[in-house]
Amino acid sequence: MFISLRLLPRLLASVAVVSAAGCAVGPDFHRPEAPAIQSYTGKPLPDSTTSADIVGGAAQHFLQGQDVPGQWWTLFKSDPMTGLVNEALAANPDLASAEATLEQAQENARATEGAYFPQADARYSAAREGRGPGSHIPAFDLFNAGVTVSYVLDVFGGVRRGVEATDAQTDNTRFQMEATYTSLISNVMTTAIRVASTQAQIAATQDIIKAESQSLDLLNQQFELGAVAKGDVLAQQSELAQIQASLPPLQKQLSQFQFQLSQLLGRFPGTGMPTLDLNTLYLPTDLPVSLPSKLIDQRPDVRSAEANLHVASANVGVATANLLPQFTLSAGYGSPTPGIGDAGTVFNGNNLLWNLAGGVTQPIFHGGTLLARKRAALDAYDAAAARYRSVALSAFQDVANTLRAMQLDAETLRVQLYAEKSSEQSLGIVQERFKAGAVSYLSLLDAERQYEQARILLVQAQANRYADTVALFVALGGGWWNRDDFATAAQDKKNNPSPTPAPLPVATDAVVAPTPEQKP
């Protein structure tokens, strides 16, 4: 008996190895291939954008095949902007929630991996029993102690597929966290740029109001001298009122952007906000543009969709294994039940029992439930594959749209700067001629309107250059794979691999859908 007990752990370990070496039914997952395209836009990308002689108007050069840095936001060389990003990364509740969700997924994956190993439980109980008052048998103690061990023989890989699905779900959660991380940085920077742009538009509007007020004072003086008609004065008053009416919406917009930025930083509204100035931002001139073949590896949303596809693939294996026999092995060791005596005699050799048992369960009839679940798993796989293709197409569309916008917005800024300077010079000439009585008030009013519009549009065009640059870094994936914390986590995972008895299928470069023979 005792020789058998000593051999029991070895027997269980041997069975575990045999089980791990068994086949795993269902499709082996393979990573999707990168699209065989050479350019995001279909046409060769120009070496650089056009330039304009103004802050934010520098020509930007596209460096083909270059990688996105992990802290790309520092390329704007703005301490206030970098401070906002760092504060958001430290205090944003959505990011904190995503990080906690990832930790939860990792712990759930570790819990699932416990199915690889035998399950052992110890038991002990004590009771006092006796007969009725008329009995001559004295009361006695009942003690029961033992250990039970059970193990599921994963002959067809159902357990391994289940662990594979859980690990893939953890990957999905991790890439969702990376998407939250990248989106947070993008939102902080874009909102900060909007704040600075709106502040600049407010300042320009206030300057225009000041100039229009001076024009109104001049018209009133000329009206008193009889040089202009009352209608010209009223027209100027109307023009001034319209410009003044445009100021509150801008101030409202500024407050909304500031409150939005406060929320992203984890602050309550009205807790203070640093003053941002478009003129203090540096427009990065050397822009890395990673190869199209790398995009599906870099975009967190694409990697998340890929992980979902992996989950669906593993679930096909789980559903397939549920159709096949299930093998179990169990063992027990302890005192007999019932055992009578004191606690010191529970583990007496004369009172001990042991057992070793094996079992097999073959599903015969479940009303079509198991077959339906397998077909549902195959349908879920097809749906996940379609979603993956959709997400990948959207990723390439984002990059193409951003690259095109950068080229056109650079040209817009150049033209808008020319328009602003031209309208400013034209307004000066018309003002001088109006003072000399050489032109009508309508000409002056038209020149003022053109200058007002050109100045506002110039500020917007400047902000668009910065926003486009942020959008490009995000569209290319955000550089999460080059961050220090990600590299540290990857090294830790390498140094502390999951305790799996057999390796999971190695990813290659193709998506393999379930073959016809794998379908029911």
Image (spheres, rainbow, N blue to C red):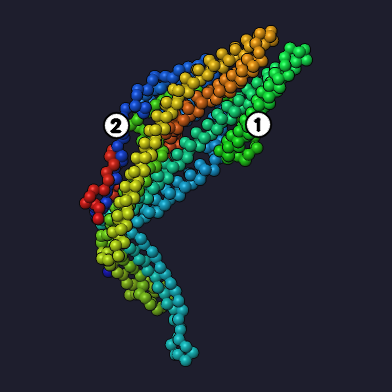
Q: Nearer the viewer, residue 105 or 1?
A: 105
- Relative image position of residue 405 (x, y in whole percent): 45, 26
- Which residue is rendered at x = 39% and y = 26% of the image? 289
Q: Quadrant of residue 121?
A: bottom left
- Which residue is rendered at x = 63% and y = 34% of the image? 252
Residue located farthest toward the right when viewing the structure as drawn: 224
In the image, 251: left or right of 328? right
- Relative image position of residue 205 (x, y in whole percent): 64, 24
Q: Amino acid at mark 1?
A: Pro
Whether 414 is drawn above or below 433: the answer is below
In the image, 333: left or right of 200? left
Q: How many marks?
A: 2
* Residue to which mark 2 is pinned: 36
Residue 26 numbered mark, or none:
none
Q: How far is the residue under mark 2 from the one under mark 1?
A: 52 Å
The mark closer to the camera, 2 or 1, is 1
In the image, 285: left or right of 253? left
On the question of residue 331 being in view, the answer is yes
- Relative image position of residue 370 (x, y in whole percent): 30, 60
Q: Amino acid at mark 2?
A: Ala
Disc 2, SS: loop
Where the N terminus falls, by quadrant? Answer: bottom left
In the image, 139: left or right of 166? right
Q: Earlier in the sequence, mark 2 or mark 1?
A: 2
- Which residue is rendered at x = 44% and y = 22% of the image? 407
Q: Residues within 10 Å of mark 2 (few under 14, many from 20)?
A: few
Q: Nearer the viewer, residue 329 or 424?
A: 424
Q: Quadrant of residue 224?
A: top right
* Residue to which mark 1 is pinned: 248
- Which residue is rendered at x = 29% and y = 62% of the image? 368
Q: Residues within 10 Å of mark 1 (few under 14, many from 20)?
A: few
Residue located farthest toward the bottom when viewing the structure as drawn: 134
